[in-house]
Image: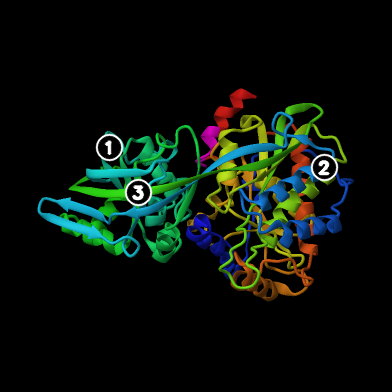
Amino acid sequence: MPWGKREAMGKIQVHKMMLAMAALSLTGLSACSASTMQPATPDRALPVVDINAYQRDVEVLASDQFGGREPSTAGEIKTIDFLVDSFKAAGLVGGNNGSFLQDVPLVAITAESATPLQFRSGDTEVTLEMGREAVAWTKRVTDEVNVVSSDLVFVGYGIVAPEYGWNDYAGLDVAGKTVVILVNDPGFATGDDALFRGRAMTYYGRWTYKYEEAARQGATGAIVIHETEAAGYPWTVVAGGWTGAQYDLERADNNAGRAVFEGWISTGAARRLFSAFGHDLGALTERAARTGFKPVTMNGTVNVSIQNSLQRSKSRNVIAMLPGTVAADETVAFSAHWDHLGTKTSTRGDGIFNGAVDNATGTAALLEMARVMAQREHRRSVLFVAVTAEESGLLGSAWFADNPTVSLGKMAGLINIDAMQPNGPTNDVVVIGYGSSELEGILGAAADRQGRKLVVEPTPEKGFFYRSDHFNFAKQGVPVLYAKAGVEHQENGSDYGLKKAAEYVSQRYHSPADEVSENWDWRGIEQDLTLYLEVAQQLANSAYWPNWYVGNEFKAKRDLSADQR
C-alpha cells in the first residue's frame, strides 16, 4: 500500500531507533513538568490487567480468518464486528451519538500516466525523469490535471510559524505559481538551538505540512527537494512510495485544500535545475536557514500533465465510550489503528499480512483498557478510538480529528498505542517526541512507581512524533502521549532487547511473518498496559488540564481551546 511503501522507512526507523539507542535517561523530570500540575492521586487498588484475555484478543485479531484487516474488505467487517461486540460486552456505549461506528470515506487516486516534469527558462529546458529524478501526483479528486508554464518560486523551507517568528511567504503572492521547498526546518539545517528546536524536527519540517501550507497560500504546485539526512530516508523510499494508488480521504474540500500538483525532486536534480536557471542551490539553502530570508523568483516555469483513475470506498472508525460521572463532557482518550495490509496473492506463503504486533497488540490494548476501566466510575468520560487506514496515511485518525464525536477542546489528553513488542519486561520506557507536553510528568511518575525510567529517542531530528495517529489529535491542540517499551530487558539486558527488536524489523515487520508466536513473552506488554492504565486513571479522575510545554507548535491551539471549557 502507498503509505506502507513511502512511510515504511518511518516505522522501520522507529525500530532502528531502538536498535541504536544509547538509552539516555531523562533526568530532572519533575523540573520539566509544570509546577501547576495537579493530577489525581494514583489509585493503587485499580483492577489489574487480565493478560490472558488480552492475549486471546490479539490472537483473534491476528488470525488468518481476519485476512490482514485491510480497510474496505471482508477482513474489515470481521474486525469491526469483533471490536463492537467486545466493547458492548465490557459495558461501553457508542461514542458517536450512540453508535460505535464512524464512516470514513476513502478514495484511491492512481496516476495512470504522467509527463516528466519539464522546466523552462528562456531557451534553457530541464526535463526530470519520473522515478529516477522526480515524482509528481495530484491529491485532487479528478481525472486529469494540466499545469502549463507555472512560474517557479524558491520559498526556502516554506514555513509560516508565528511562534518562531518565521514566515517564508511574507509579502508573497504565489497564486498560479509553483513553489520549490526544502525539507525539514532551519533548526535542523543549522543545529542552532535558538532556531525552532535545533536539530529536533518540528511539525513545520514535515513534508506533509509543506504541501498543506503551499495550498493555503494558493500555490498551483508544490515541489519538495529531497535530502536524505534531512528527510530521514533515501530517495529510493520516495521513488518507490509515490507510485501506484495514493489513498486519501474524500472530503468536500479535497480540491480546494490541495495544490493542483505535488511532488519531490532529488538533490542532484535540484542542483542541476537551479544551476541551469542561474542559481546556486547551496548558497540559497544557507540563506533560507537565516532569519529574514526572502523568497527567490527562479525566472523559470514548469509543465506537467497527470491522468488519474479513481476508486472510492468506505471504511469505519470504531468509537466506544465510558461516560463520566461528574464531567461527562470532558474526555480522556486512547487511540490505536485496527487496520493492516490485508492479503496479497503474489506474496510467498499464505500471503496474509496478519499484523500481530502491528497493530493487533494496540487494538487489543483498547479492549483490555476498556474492560479494566469499566470496573470503576470516573469523573471524566473515557473514549476509545480504533481508527482505520493508518497504513494508508493516518487517514482514519485524520477523519476523526476533523469530524470529532466529542469536543477536542475538552479532551484532557490522548494515549496512542501502536505495535507493542512481546519481548518481556524492561527497565526503560521510550518517549517519542519527549519534551512536548505535561503528560510526560504523569507518565514519568507512573514509570517510577514501576521502577522504570523514561528514555528519549536519540534521533528526534527524524520527526517520528509526527508519524503516528496521535499526530492528528496534536494538530488540534490535544496533548498526546506516544510511549513504547524500551530495550533494557529486566533479566537479559539490553543486548537481548536489541536482538529481539532487530529480529522483528528484519524478519516480521510488514510481512506475513508478523504472526502470534508461542515464543512471545507477554509480561512486558502487561507492564506497559498497567503503565498506560495508571496515566489514564489519573487523568480521568482529575480536574487537571495538561498543556503543551511553552514553545511547542501545538500550544497556541490548546490555549485557544481553554476558552471553550
Q: Quadrant of residue 125?
A: bottom left
Question: Distance of mark 1 from mark 3, alpha carbons?
Answer: 24 Å
Is residue 489 depicted above or below 445 in this figure? below
Query: Residue at (70%, 68%) from the top-left corner?
Result: 488
Q: Residue flagged by tag 1: what amino acid is it?
A: Val
Residue 75 horizontal/vertical position (percent): 68, 53
Out of 345 and 230, give the one closest to the viewer: 345
In the displayed structure, 132 sits above or below 83; it is below
The answer to if 19 sits in the magenta stretch is no
Q: Residues within 10 Å of mark 3 (few under 14, many from 20)?
A: some
Q: Earlier in the sequence, mark 1 or mark 2?
A: 1
Q: Amino acid at mark 2?
A: Met
Q: Position of residue 186 (x, y in %)?
A: 38, 51
- Residue 98 lies, in percent from the top left, at 74, 30
Position of residue 222 in the picture relative to residue 212 (left or right): left
Does the image show residue 293? no
List the residue tagged with mark 3: 307
The location of residue 100, given as percent across then percent down, is 72, 37
Q: Nearer the viewer, mark 2 or mark 3?
A: 3
Is 556 inside the magenta-drawn segment?
yes
| Above or below: residue 501 compared with residue 414 | below
* Residues rendered magenta in the picture: 551-557
Q: Which mark is residue 373?
A: 2
Secondary element type, mark 1: loop
The quarter in which the C terminus is drawn is top right
Q: Kindly check if marks 1 and 3 are in contact, taking CB atoms under 8 A apart as contact.
A: no
Q: State the residue position of label 1.
A: 174
Alpha carbon separation for disc pair 2 and 3: 51 Å
